[in-house]
Image (tube, coloured by chain):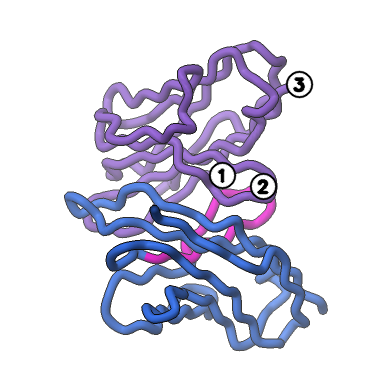
Chain colours: A blue, B purple
Amino acid sequence: AQSVTQPDIHITVSEGASLELRCNYSYGATPYLFWYVQSPGQGLQLLLKYFSGDTLVQGIKGFEAEFKRSQSSFNLRKPSVHWSDAAEYFCAVGSPPRGSTLGRLYFGRGTQLTVWP
Amino acid sequence: DTGVSQDPRHKITKRGQNVTFRCDPISEHNRLYWYRQTLGQGPEFLTYFQNEAQLEKSRLLSDRFSAERPKGSFSTLEIQRTEQGDSAMYLCASSRQGYYGYTFGSGTRLTVV
């Protein structure tokens, strides 16, 4: 069965510090991996996705993530955090698309990021 | 691209009442998804449509839940005989062929009192 584990429920960093949010997945084949961000009371915004190829993927807002098959991980990183990055971050895994369209996703429970000024 | 629109944004209802939510996807998106998110959890899949066909339903979608997408455009999610455990954010997302990602709406927050 597919599943996602985000081991850190809450992370606090100072503005300007680097950030790494952890994500481990369970999936039998090549996974499709995603990171989403959610601000309070809002829907989810896609930060980045990985399907194949280069295991280091770049996303929006200066975020990047690295796929490590041997560790079943897809950790999200940012070299310098801004106060506006405070939000909840969700990692998700999905099956390869059928008919060139994505099916259901399995989400982790999220990591709440607090940024100190 | 006007984004995914959900209506209403908030709904408070008494236990036992029926509620219906609407989702308008991005116009050229042929797939539409419903998820439910409770406090402190990630979104959980409920169901999805390709055009008007409902392709998959989660076990979370009990007999009290029904979703439709009659003309392959907007979708409705109805919950009958609401229970307090139905209180959650209901998220709609859409996607198009060849684009491997979703666009989410802002959600409908349901509170059952």
Mark 2, Cα crowd under 10 Å, few <14 / some 14-19 / many 20+, is few
Alpha-carbon span between mark 1 and mark 2: 7 Å
Identified by mark 3, the residue type is: Val
Q: Are marks 3 and 1 on the same chain?
A: yes
Res. A30 image quadrant:
bottom left
Identify the residue shown where x is 50% and y is 18%: B64
Please tell me whether residue A85 belongs to the stretch shown in magenta.
Answer: no
Q: Chain of mark 1?
A: B
Identify the residue shown where x is 29% and y is 30%: B54
Q: Is residue A61 left or right of residue A116?
A: left
What number is the disc on residue A41?
A: 2
Please tell me whether residue A35 belongs to the stretch shown in magenta.
Answer: yes
Q: Chain of mark 2?
A: A
Closer to the eye: label 3 or 1:
3
Identified by mark 1, the residue type is: Ser
- Identify the residue at the far right of this view: A117
Identify the residue shown where x is 39% and y is 68%: A49
Q: Is residue A90 left or right of residue B110?
A: left
Residue B10 in view here: no
Q: Which residues are magenta?
A: A33-46
Secondary structure mostly seen in the magenta stretch = strand
The residue singled out by tag 1 in the image is: B106
Mark 3, Cα crowd under 10 Å, few <14 / some 14-19 / many 20+, is few
What number is the disc on residue B113?
A: 3
Res. A19 image quadrant:
bottom right
Viewer-nearest residue: A45 or A91: A91
Q: Quadrant of the C terminus of chain B?
A: top right
Identify the residue shown where x is 61% and y is 38%: B89
Alpha-carbon span between mark 3 and mark 1: 22 Å
Q: Are marks 3 and 2 on the same chain?
A: no
